[in-house]
Amino acid sequence: MIVSALIVFAAFLFLVFANAIFVAVEFSYLTVNRNDVKKAADSGLKSAYLVDRALSRTSTNLSGAQLGITVTSLVAGFLTGPSLGVLLEAAFGGTSVSPATVTAISTTGAFIIATFTQMVFGELVPKNWAIAEPTKVANLVVRPQNAFMFAFGWLVWLLNSAANWVLKRLGFSPEEEVASARTAEELRAVVTRSSDEGKINPQTAELVARSIEFGERTAADVMTPRTQIIFIEDQSVAEMLTVVADSGHARFPVVGNSVDDIRGVVHYTDLLSVPHAQRLTTSAASLAKDVLVVNDSTTLDPLMRQLREDAYQFAVVVDEYGGTDGIVTLEDLVEEIVGEIDDEQDDRSLLYSRISPNTVIVSGLMRPDELGEILNLVLPEGDESDTIGGFITERLDRMPRFGDTVTVEATDHENLDEENLPTTAEVAFRVERMARHRVGRIRVQVDRVGNKVAHRDEGADQEGTSHNHVEHNSEQEG
């Protein structure tokens, strides 16, 4: 009897070991770095080659591992009680303890020992090891996993088919393989989390995040609007050289009958190439070269390729009707990745000036996401506008006036609540100056109220809440 119990207990330990292998397969296959596996396989490591092949069928292998875990756990539980009970009863044999008490102690002890052994050695140890060293563990377990799949692959296929049939009846579309690729949003989340945990430098994290966002932006997001452009019409070379000296700009679009009639582009070096004696009589427009024209909906990835191939690294942005929207340069695109680049032609005071930690004066032409980077907030954006000035106009639903104030809620990822969740900040935009028919300067006041961000089903927007308060001011600008 005792010998039989020992044999059954040995079988239980074997099943715990088998369960540990299946758990290791599950977690190592999910967490292993596929690039590392690919490199090791290319270098000739046989086990890495097997892992690489197995990862091409991750979903099937995970189903096999889950089948193995289920079967070994059930069989181990079935065998453990009787065998351990017999061994424990034998240990109490010859004592004065009553048979009923011995049975109760043996049953309870068998349950505790089996649960502890199964959880620690069959579940937690292989799981934690696989998470800590996924590549090493995957290389160790790939052969027994392949052998199991060779023997029971048909059963795994049958169970998968049954599960997919149920999902389809419930209205879901089953995925046969685990997606190894990640969306831009998922990559941003990974970068942010890695930065928060100190795995990568914050500056590196910001650069990566900007690079991910780069492909989502369009020419309309980064262009200089037409109202800020100096055009060449009928000016002489001498006149335009004076404009170059005053403005600091290097390239100027040439127009014909109107600003929507773009004829080309002139670089200041073209102007300087004209002999001094001829500069008063030579038309700057006569020096025009062909200009790259792009649609305002062109995304930045193809736009960067076009600008790198363009001699002047300059393009005119047009709307769907062919009208001039603005201009964009290669520097504008580079700044979307690395941030603002200051050079001798830039005046940072035109962009923003910080009055206090929570108060800044900004240009109405600044984008909400640019201001968000300055304030470390996620601000709501306009439906039909790209700039803060346009956003204010949208909220007012009329032409803004000096003193108008729009208050919105933004998401503060820097100041977290006790549950480590983002809080809200109240942001007030006050029009400080109008530039003819657009908002020129805005005072931005931030009140980091620290309230928990509402969930989406409570009406919140992940890009900053849409609740706003508008104050109308009849005071005239002085």
Image (cartoon, helix red, strand yellow):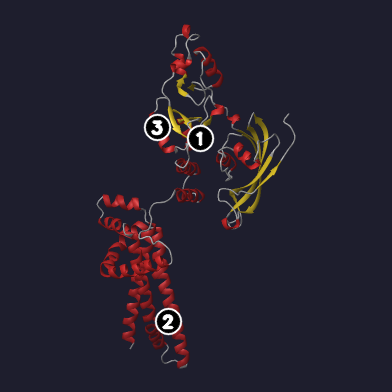
The residue identified by callout 1 is: 222
Mark earlier in primary sequence (1, 2): 2
Give the alpha-carbon distance from disc 1 to disc 3, as whole Å: 15 Å
| Residue 335 place in picture, x, y as percent | 49, 34
Asked whether the viewer can see residue 110, the reply is yes
Determine which residue is flagged by label 2: 110
Is 16 left, or right, of 211 in this rendering? left
Residue name at image x 39 percent, y 57 percent: 31
Q: Which amino acid type corresponds to the residue marked 2 in the rendered image?
A: Ala
- Whether the residues at callouts 2 and 3 have beta carbons within 8 Å, the answer is no
On residue 438, the disc is none
Q: Position of residue 144 (x, y in %)?
A: 28, 66
Neighbours of disc 1 within 10 Å: few (<14), some (14-19), many (20+): many
Task: Identify the residue at horizontal 44%, vertical 19% (top origin).
Answer: 288
With respect to residue 237, does 385 lie above or below? below
Q: Could you tell me how far apart the alpha carbons at marks 2 and 3 are, in whole angstroms?
A: 73 Å
Q: Which mark is residue 306?
A: 3
Residue at position x 34%, y 67% in the image: 160
Describe the element under mark 3 as helix, strand or loop.
helix
Q: Nearer the viewer, mark 2 or mark 3?
A: 3
Query: Under tag 1, what secondary structure?
Result: helix
Amino acid under disc 3: Gln
Residue farthest right in this picture: 475
